[in-house]
Amino acid sequence: MESRDVAQAAINLAMSKTREAENDLKNKYLGMGIQSLAVDYGGEFLSSLQKVVERAVVASKREKIIDESSHSDGAVAGATREALVQIMPKALGLNVGGKVGIARGGTHIAVAIFFGIGLLHRNDVAIGLGHRAI
């Protein structure tokens, strides 16, 4: 399993438009040996940084993508933070909404964040990607 495959799975999940598409992707990737999940999120960017990281860690544990170790928690939290930092220049002070996609294959874990960013009628999009090895 290559890190690129795992990253691509996380990106595709983060960009999935419906729950049905998300479930189809999860099943497809599971057949390839990649565990995955997606979590919706929306709110003011700066005040939600901690919440996005917490949701990523909690969802990863709930879906059994990671175990209960602090090492696994740190890997997901670090990859999520890395993805958020990539979005930060566009999103500071604005509202965001979208999905966080998380995938794990072997020792690789990837977190992709795909957010719409907006204020009034101004809408933009951004994607961030973080990777860690467990």
Image: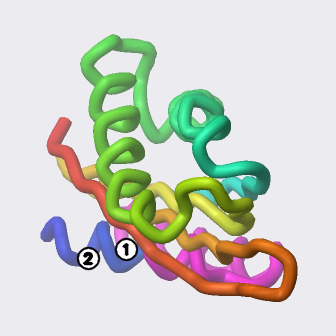
User: CB atoms at circles 2 and 1 under 8 Å apart?
Assistant: yes
Q: Residue at x 19, y 36 (%)?
A: 134
Q: Residue at x 73, y 60 (%)?
A: 95
**Residue picked out by circle 2:** 5
Distance, label 2 to label 1, CA atoms, is: 10 Å
Mark 2 or 1, nearer chain start: 2
Task: Look at the picture and state if 131 lies above or below 25.
Answer: above
Instruction: Count neighbours of disc 2 (C-alpha within 10 A) and say few if under 14, some if 14 to 19, many if 20 or more.
Output: some
- Residue 121: x percent and y percent? 84, 87
- Residue 35: x percent and y percent? 46, 56
Front-most of residues 71 and 44 = 44
Does the image show residue 1? no
Range of magenta residues = 10-35
Task: Look at the picture and state if 17 lies above or below 100.
Answer: below
Q: Secondary structure at mark 2?
A: helix
Q: Which quadrant of the view contains residue 110?
A: bottom left
Q: Which secondary structure is most common in the magenta stretch?
A: helix
Res 32 label: 1
The three-letter code of the residue at mark 2 reads: Asp
Q: Residue at x 62, y 85 (%)?
A: 124
Instruction: Count neighbours of disc 1 (C-alpha within 10 A) and say few if under 14, some if 14 to 19, many if 20 or more.
Output: few
Front-most of residues 94 and 84 = 94
